[in-house]
Amino acid sequence: MRRLTAAAVVLAIALALWPRGAGADYLVADLSKRRIDITLGFAGAEVLLFGATDTGGDVVVVVRGPNQKVVVRHKDRLGGIWVNREWMQFNNVPNFYYVASSRPLEVIASQPTFAGIEVGLKNLRMTPGDSSQGADADSFRAALVRVKQHEGLYATGSGQVNFIGGRLFRTTVSFPATVEPGPYTVEVFLLRKGNVESAQRWPLFITKVGVSASVFERAHEDPALYGLVAVAIAVMAGWLGAAGLWKV
Amino acid sequence: MQVYLPIAQISVDVFVLLAMGAAVGFLSSLFGVGGGFLITPLLIFIGIPPPVAVATQINQVVGASVSGTVAHWRRGNIDFKMGLVLMVGTILGSTAGVNLFAMLKRAGQIDLVIVLLYIVFLGGIGSLMLAESLRALLRRRRAPGARFKLHQHTWLHGLPLKMRFRKSRLYISALLPLGLGFITGILIAMMGVGGGFFLVPSKIYLLGMPTAIAVGTSLFQTIFVAAYSTLLQSIETQTVDILLAIVLLVGGLLGTQVGARIGPKLQGDQLRILLALLIVGVWVKLVFDVTATPADVYSLDVLMGPS
């Protein structure tokens, strides 16, 4: 243990003496928490991101979480009934995506700059996979983003990063109750004159804990027993209900 | 008060769930239907993923059927022999239904087939029931106290393998309840419901069972079918949410109490009209759903696992 601490101290000193990389220290920031617990009472959560820059500039914060495969389906009217017809699969679709910035994105930098760092709904690199014949990728992609926005999982406008006294900044990220457990990333970019000067990135884990975690575990690790318990609980509850009737 | 459901992975208001559970308990004690055909769409409406809604509500049906069965048993409303014959048919039917389900899923239209099945069955049963019970009501008004035939004799009563069902006051071919059970089994596997909404009216109108016996026997049989489905869902899909089931069950206990007190005060005819109206109501909503222009013609389907 002591040896490990010593090694850490040596490493810290070495890092401090190292010649400065491309502006690594223009930006310092941190999160109020690195882990969000989903308990029985979970109804969404907020994470505070705060930091400082050396001399102002624009700050953009991006939060995204577990990538998924999503199939987008399009309904058509067929003999008076709406039927799913065309479809297209997309890979690397973040379940949750949120962007906050100190000023509107279009004022901060040009479109190619943001495309490079995957900032903004237009710049999400969701890759189309299999699809039905003749499905138009652009309209399916637009529909995917629209539905996600409607579900409150994709940020609709640019959220606000607030500067305090020109150098300190802060922003609050809220996760809705429907948020998917899994690994998330939080990125902060410092931009000046349309260029990315500095960036920082953290992992953020959203995990089930306590009762909700153990219920989930049991259901997946011991499904037969879980099913039997579910039936037993139902039978008991039903019996109790009937017993209640007996007395009245 | 919000509670996070571990399998559904969403947090919902406990009181909304309690109210929904109560509605189902009320229906099941009154009509002998599990209420699955109503609760599943409601659960989906408040944001529970459809597979979890289907699997969990079938678990809740177990509880609702147990309390309903006990209540009807005391009143002597269960024809155990009939129940067992039906159950054999149901288990055979659900095995066939599971295969049919997989086939349609591969073809990519399972959702629509399910809704269309609902529309056909609910529409047929609902309108038949409504017409018949209205007719019965009018007839009784005209000739109070007159006795009517329990049921009409048709070619169905000429089938072989005759069996006597004392409780139901029937002497019919065992093939009838077997076949009825078989169809119910297919419906259970395909639609994820207890099948009571189909079974109860069929018993009354096709087999000619007295309403109260049809309700009690259906509840008795549903216990086993629903328990079997719950187990199967837990093992195959892991979509049974125990917490959601418990909240629905607690609500159900309240609803059952109310239903059991109101039930005896209503007459068979009135009960049937109410059930018919309910079925027709659900039918209207389903027809509206598939024919009205959707809010967004696009929908998302998240595939399992990370990409």
Image (cartoon, rainbow, N blue to C red):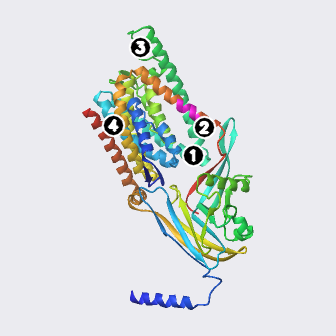
Q: Name the front one of labels 3 and 2.
A: 2
The 10 Å Cα crowd at callout 3, few under 14, some 14 to 19, many 20 or more, is few
The 10 Å Cα crowd at callout 2, few under 14, some 14 to 19, many 20 or more, is some
Q: Is residue A187 above or below residue B238?
A: below
Magenta residue check for A23:
no
> In whole angstroms, how far apart are the C-alphas of marks 3 and 4?
32 Å
- Residue linked to disc 4: B67
- Residue linked to disc 2: B289
What is the three-letter code of the residue carrying label 4? Ser
Residue at the farthest left position: A247
Segment colored magenta: B281-286
Identify which residue is drawn at 39% across, 60% down: A214
Going from N to C along the chain, the mark reached first, 1 or 4, is 4
- Dot 1: element: helix
Going from N to C along the chain, the mark reached first, 1 or 2, is 1
Image position of B113 (left or right of B208): right
